Image (spheres, grey):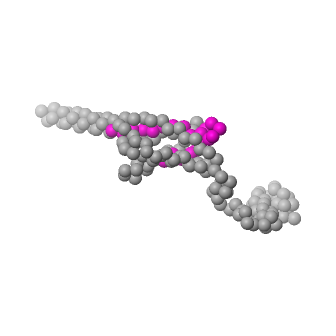
Amino acid sequence: MMRLVRDCSVFTLIFLLGIAAAWAQLATAQLNGRVTDSSGAVLPGATVTMTQTATGLVRDAVTDGTGSYLISNLPTGPYRLEVSLQGFRSYVQTGLVLQVGATPTVNAVLSLGSIERAKSMYPGTMSRRRSKRGARANTRSKAVAIASSLPAFCSATASSISA
């Protein structure tokens, strides 16, 4: 008799856990898409961020080698989508409302950032105010520093640059 009660309780527990997992999958949505540049080339490595505007929940994904992304198990509600990649202007779409079981596709097209913006993303770049003479001296000193850090078989190159 005890074995029958134990078996029934184990079966009931497994059944209830299965129902809870199935319900959780049905009460969510997912978002997928592809990220390309303005010429249609895919952009792997782009960061895709979904922010639920009602709660502040943030979910991230990174595009794969084909520029595709998938963010699953998103609670339903209103979202803000942002896609970013260094050197490109961010793509932002607001007002996305995910419904239960929905799988919308949002493809993002990123355009190149402006020259000033692209420059500011790289630390250590020269400012435009620096004179040509200062820029040449800075470039030469960087080349010497890089060349001197090379292995010994490249020492002839390092000495020729510093001269």
Q: Is residue 89 above or below residue 37?
A: below
Residue 46 falls within the magenta-colored stretch? yes
Rendered image quadrant of residue 24: top left
Residue drawn at 82 percent across, 66 percent down: 133
- Residue 20 or residue 125, whichever sits in front: 125
Q: Is residue 92 above or below residue 136?
A: above
Residue 98 falls within the magenta-colored stretch? no
Is 39 placed left or right of 59 in the picture?
right
Rendered image quadrant of residue 134: bottom right
Q: Is residue 141 above or below residue 74?
A: below
Residue drawn at 43 percent across, 35 percent down: 103
- Magenta stretch, residue numbers: 27-49
Rendered location of residue 61, percent (x, y) = 50, 45
Q: Quadrant of the C terminus?
A: bottom right
Residue drawn at 40 percent across, 48 percent down: 52
Residue 52 appears anywhere in the view = yes
Is 90 placed left or right of 151 in the picture?
left
Is 29 placed left or right of 23 in the picture?
right
- Residue 42 or residue 155, whichever sits in front: 42
Rendered location of residue 97, percent (x, y) = 40, 42
Q: Quadrant of the N terminus?
A: top left
- Residue 57 or residue 151, whichever sits in front: 57
Is 143 placed left or right of 92 in the picture?
right
The mark tally for this picture is 0
- Residue 163 or residue 130, whichever sits in front: 130
Residue drawn at 45 percent across, 39 percent down: 31
Rendered location of residue 88, percent (x, y) = 61, 48
Rendered location of residue 81, percent (x, y) = 48, 46
